[in-house]
Image (spheres, rainbow, N blue to C red):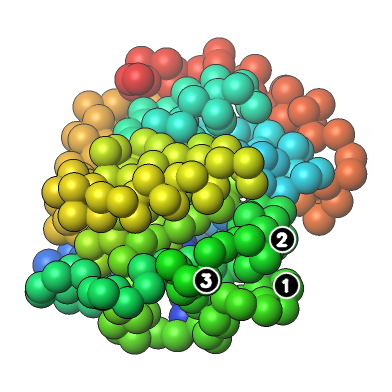
């Protein structure tokens, strides 16, 4: 099996998808499963975030005529729940899933269920695989807690400075209301606001971030409708019990390793609850082993390749629909103000009349 990750990687600190996919690519390279040339790939993994869809759709279009690889989409949605006005973007993702991609990876059960709600049912084979963090960079402190007899140390991290999506309303509230005799708080990343009491640090590379996380006692995230927060997973893997907003995949990720809150009315209480039993919550931290995560991807790829072998004619016919679909989608993505559903209707009806149904699983 040869795998290619169709993603424009960015060096240095960046968003969660960039960091996770870099680590996933590194794993495939170490296992001698990776190819830099997508035309030689058996599997092409695509990430359907806003930047990748806008920048990579042309390349996807070109690949449909030069490769017979199995196309897999790592879904990063629903995007409209994090960014107002992007409802049509999620419709595009759903349409691409249903006609272009042979399989979909959802980062959480929450993401899978919400995509069904905001767009029509997703038809390709799918699997839910949580993200992971490198054990070489993110791991717990060897002994004790970071705070010892000093103030309890809280940390939040975010690459994006989107005020609403990343929950800066909560961080602003904590900046003004956190008990500074008991707690000290650090924020690492980009921020749209100037903090008065929270210590602000610019984005750092993953190795440095791991070190900083281990210097703290509690991780907090207030992001909204985040399907599977890499930042949260990094905090958990570094041994920090979490205080998370009751939104997106957060509750699903922390299990019994933290406490959820809803808004400013109960955030302080949630922090106090975890602070009162840090050691107890640490005993219930979930495990996000990166090798296990990567192998789950490989198992899904193997299943899709096996399915391809059983139904070669179905996939060959799909290529025609892929090219037509992408020609239309490329144009529409440059102007999301126009209606998207009508232009896809004819293509989707033709695909439903084809033989794709014989190789569908749920």
Q: Secondary structure at mark 2?
A: loop
Which quarter shows the C terminus?
Answer: top left
Closer to the chain start, of discs 2 and 3, is 2
Q: Which residue is mark 2?
A: 163
Question: Height in image: 195 above or below 267?
Answer: below
Whole-angstrom CA distance, mark 3 to mark 1, is: 22 Å
| Side (left or right) of 104 relative to 335 | left
Query: Tag 1 or tag 3, which sits nearer the N-term?
Result: 3
Query: Which residue is outermost to the right?
Result: 338
Choose between 94 and 64: the one closer to the eye. 94
SS for dot 3: loop
The residue that label 3 is drawn on is 180
Q: Residue at left 67%, top 79%? A: 196
The one nearer the camera, 112 or 355, is: 112
Q: Which residue is mark 1?
A: 192
Q: For the residues labelled 1 and 2, say whether their Cβ atoms are less than 8 Å apart.
A: yes
């Amino acid at each position: 099996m040869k795998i290619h990750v169709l993603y424009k990687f960015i060096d240095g600190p960046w968003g969660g998808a960039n960091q996770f996919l870099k680590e996933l690519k590194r794993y495939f390279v170490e296992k001698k499963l990776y190819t830099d040339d997508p035309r030689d790939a058996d599997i092409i993994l695509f990430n359907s975030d806003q930047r990748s869809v806008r920048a990579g759709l042309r390349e996807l279009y070109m690949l449909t005529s030069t490769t017979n690889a199995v196309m897999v989409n790592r879904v990063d949605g629903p995007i409209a729940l994090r960014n107002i006005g992007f409802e049509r973007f999620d419709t595009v993702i759903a349409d691409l899933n249903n006609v272009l991609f042979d399989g979909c990876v959802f980062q959480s059960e929450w993401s899978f269920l919400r995509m069904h709600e905001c767009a029509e049912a997703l038809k390709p084979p799918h699997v839910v695989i949580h993200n992971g963090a490198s054990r070489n960079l993110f791991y717990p402190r060897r002994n004790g807690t970071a705070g010892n007899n000093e103030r309890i140390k809280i940390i939040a991290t975010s690459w994006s400075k989107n005020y609403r999506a990343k929950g800066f309303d909560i961080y602003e509230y904590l900046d003004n209301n956190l008990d500074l005799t008991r707690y000290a708080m650090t924020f690492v990343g980009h921020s749209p606001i100037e903090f008065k009491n929270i210590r602000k640090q610019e984005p750092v590379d993953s190795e440095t971030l791991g070190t900083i996380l281990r210097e703290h006692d509690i991780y907090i995230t207030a992001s909204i409708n985040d399907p599977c927060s890499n930042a949260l997973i990094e905090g958990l893997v570094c041994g920090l019990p979490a205080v998370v907003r009751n939104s997106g995949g957060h509750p699903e990720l922390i299990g019994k390793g933290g406490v959820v809150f809803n808004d400013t009315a109960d955030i302080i209480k949630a922090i106090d609850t975890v602070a009162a039993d840090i050691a107890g919550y640490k005993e219930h931290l979930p495990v996000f082993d990166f090798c296990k995560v990567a192998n789950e991807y490989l198992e899904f790829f193997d299943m899709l390749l096996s399915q391809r072998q059983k139904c070669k004619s179905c996939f060959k016919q799909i290529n025609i629909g892929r090219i037509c679909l992408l020609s239309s989608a490329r144009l529409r993505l440059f102007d999301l103000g126009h209606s998207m559903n009508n232009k896809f209707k004819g293509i989707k009806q033709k695909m439903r009349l084809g033989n794709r149904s014989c190789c569908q699983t749920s």
